[in-house]
Image: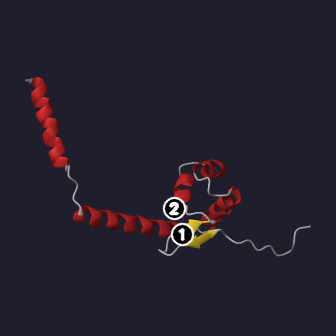
Amino acid sequence: MIPASITEQIPIRTDQHGRLRVGDSNVLLDLLIYAFRLGHTPETITEQYPSLSLDDVYLALGYYLRHREEVDAYLSQQELEAESARQMDEAQHPPALTREILLARLAAKRIQSEG
C-alpha cells in the first residue's frame, strides 16, 4: 500500500555560485533542460552525463515541467550572464583573428587563385 502522503525530495541544488545542479553531480540543470528540449530522453541524458542517475533526471524534468515559467526565467538569466561574461572576456582579450582579417585573407586568396 502506498502511504497517503508522499514526500519526494527534488534533486536540484544551488551551488556556491548560485547555479542549479542536478543530484549529487556537477551537471547543471541548464544542460539537462537543453538536452530535453532537443528531444533527448531521460535515458539518453544519463548516457551523456553518466554522473546523473535516471531517477534524478526524471525528478528534475518533472520539476521543470511543473515550474516551467520559473525555470525558463532562471535559464534566461543564466544566458544573459554568460553573454555578459563573454563580452567582458573579449574586451579584455580581443581575438587575434577578427572578421575583417579573415575577410581580407579570403579576398587575397581569391585574387591569388585568379592570378
User: Which colouring convention does the figure follow?
Assistant: secondary structure
Residue 29 image position (x, y, % from top left): 55, 63
Label 1 crowd (10 A; few <14 / some 14-19 / many >=20):
many
Look at 53% across and 49% down and name the residue there.
Answer: 38
Q: In which quarter of the image is residue 84?
A: bottom left
The residue that disc 2 covers is 30
Which numbered disc covers residue 55?
Answer: none
- Above or below, 111 relative to 63: above
- Above or below, 22 relative to 107: below
Secondary element under disc 2, as helix, strand or loop, is helix
Image quadrant in which the C terminus is located: top left
Secondary element under disc 1, as helix, strand or loop, is strand
Look at 33% across and 66% down and name the residue there.
Answer: 85
Say what amino acid the circle numbered 2 marks. Answer: Asp
Of residue 22 and residue 30, the one placed in the foreground of this image is 22
Say what amino acid the circle numbered 1 marks. Answer: Leu
Which numbered disc covers residue 20?
Answer: 1
Label 2 crowd (10 A; few <14 / some 14-19 / many >=20):
many
Residue 72 visible? The answer is yes
Disc nearer the start of the sequence (2/1): 1
Q: Are marks 2 and 1 in contact (CB under 8 Å)?
A: yes
Residue 69 visible? The answer is no
